[in-house]
Image: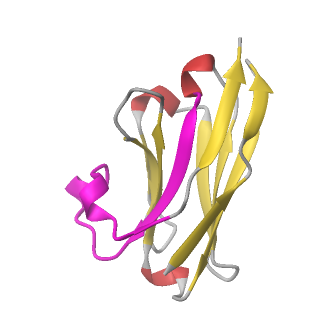
Amino acid sequence: VQLQASGGGLVQTGGFLRLSCVASGRTLSRLDMAWFRQAPGKEREFVAVTRKSGGYTYYADPVKGRFIISRDNAKNTADLQMNSLKPEDTAVYYCAAGSSIILSNVRSMNAYHYWGQGTQVTVSS
């Protein structure tokens, strides 16, 4: 599976961006899709996940209520709508995919087998 992330950019505090992840090589409908992010000098952290059916989503506390993860299995895409952006959201955002992930492991990087190249999001204050 190849993942291609896009949609990053520079935005002011309070603004919004929509990230998109396109998968190729395998149908997305069989994979759990997630977004992670890595800020300068920090470890990569979980942001959000959507299970393969699309019926379950889960968010990290810092983004809950501001970000929305969605997927379109027919188009093999998974998007992350980011609203009310804050400077602390500045990071490189990565999409990731995995199969048969135990629910308790969805926040773990090790649970995901496939990774995109990352897209930079910068929020200015």
- In the rendered image, the residue lying farthest to the top is 125
Q: Nearer the viewer, residue 35 or 103?
A: 35
* Residue located 77% across and 31% down the image: 10
Q: Residue furthest front?
A: 41
Residue at point 57%, 27% (across, down): 89
Q: Report the span colored magenta.
A: 90-115
Where's residue 100, x and y in %?
Answer: 28, 76
Image coordinates of residue 101 in percent, x first then y, are 27, 68
Expressed as whole percent of the image width and height from the top left, the position of residue 77 reads 65, 70
User: Foreground: 113 or 70?
Assistant: 113
Q: Does the stretch in magenta take in 103?
A: yes
Residue 87 in picture, x, y percent from top left: 62, 18
Residue 105 located left or right of residue 45 = left
Quadrant (top left/top right/bottom left/bottom right) for the C terminus: top right
Looking at the rendering, which quadrant does residue 104 occupy?
Answer: bottom left
> Residue 97: in sight, yes or no?
yes
- In the image, residue 88 sits, relative to residue 103, either above or below, namely above
Instruction: Choose top left, top right, bottom left or bottom right for residue 46.
Output: top left
Q: Residue at x 55, y 45 (%)?
A: 93
Residue 84 visible, this angle: no
Q: Residue at x 53, y 80 (%)?
A: 28
How many circles with numbers are drawn on the protein?
A: 0
Note whether 104 is above or below 72 in the view shown: above
Res. 109 image quadrant: bottom left
